[in-house]
Image (tube, grey):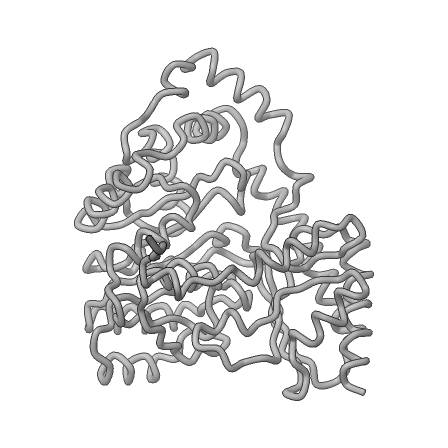
Amino acid sequence: MAISFAKRIGALQASEIREILKLTQREEMISFAGGLPAPELFPIEEMKEIARMVLEEMGREALQYSITEGYQPLRDKISQRMNRKFQTSVNAKQILITCGSQQALDFSGKLFLDKDDIVLCESPTYLAAISAFNAYEPQFVEVPTDEHGMVIEELEHILKTRKRIKLIYVIPDFQNPTGKTWSLERRFDFMEMVTKYEIPVIEDNPYGELRFEDQILPSLKSMDTKGLVIFTSTFSKTFCPGLRIGWIAADNKFIEKYVLIKQGADLCTSMRSQMEIAKYIEVYDFEAHIQKLITLYRKRRDLMVEALDKNLPHGVKFTRPQGGLFLWVELPPNIKAMDLLTECLKNNVAFVPGDSFFPNGGIENTLRLNYSNMSEEKIIEGIQRLSQAIHKCLH
């Protein structure tokens, strides 16, 4: 009997980022490819103590199944922090704990998308969101995007003229891959369109707390008057990605459905991981920990921007993010990022070519750089190697 896979499997492909990361495991490689936090800031000693406390105080509960919605004290803390940081008004009952925010994206595809339904997204957008939604066989429509966010006139034209739009996916703060942040005016205008056409929105916000300058801008969720915005985030970028703890914050009509989906997927998220994060926030200064990340990442951002300004040839453009983990480089049209990557890997420096961030492809002269993971010395050396490779490709 021949093995027969589901039709949807044929559309799935290995993540280009994951394939590149396999090449970056060599010790000599300077990698700007992954979205990895700085491991030297993981609170290892504190987490040893937290693990002991959780197991001594609540060991049986920590090692047992939990309710699907998640650990109540952690949901309380998340809602309180969201309301304080992002000006929302959510409560713990509107929070579902997930295995990282990637699971939230997969669940969102399962909740909203049938074959050939339309997802609207920024252009470019997050590669792993494309991968998560692709399993449900949608069509992606890329909304033209400038330095302030989605271009509202273009968005409205699409909303007026396209049928079967089921979902809008956006990253308003320090977007992956570009590092851009939506202006306050653009956020208001966007939410005016969403309210008018009543389309659910996934506001993916894993980086929002990592702002280097000024104040955190109000979230789209804080402007939501019809319960249409589904806010997703994670502790992976602000704490420890290995714990795999993220969350969905949404109106009850959505959370009820997400809970059913999670029950069919994995029943519940790791209780021990949830309890350890909640205990850490209770015992230690979580805001001070985030400030350490901000201080280091700001320094590394500044260093990478300075090195790019100094070394890149004329005609190469790049973004200057106000926070987050990434910046975006646009090469001259005659240079393909994949060709550049081949040259760079010979010299032990890696990045992610930009084509994969465009769900419909066709843009081959862009790339994403991460500045959070490499040391200052490696950032300087890596950008010099990258720039030398670009000069070589130009001639």
Q: Residue at x 23, y 67 (%)?
A: 199
| Residue drawn at point x = 59 percent, y = 65 percent | 321
The percent coordinates of residue 238 (x first, y second) are: 53, 44
Where residue 183 sits: x, y (%)? 44, 69
- Nearer to the camera, 332 or 310: 332
Q: Residue at x 70, y 70 (%)?
A: 341
Of 387 and 220, the residue lying toward us: 387
**Residue 164: image location, x then y, percent:** 21, 74
Using the image as rendered, state which of residue 368 and residue 298 is in the foreground.
368
Judged left or right of residue 69, residue 42 is: right
Q: Is residue 318 left or right of residue 390?
A: left
Residue at the spot 46% in from the left edge and 18% down from the top edge: 54
Q: Where, by quadrant of the figure, is residue 335 drawn?
A: bottom right
Left or right: residue 374 compared with residue 231: right
Q: Quadrant of the C terminus?
A: bottom right
**Residue 150 sits in which quadrant?**
bottom left
Which residue reaches farthest top?
Answer: 56
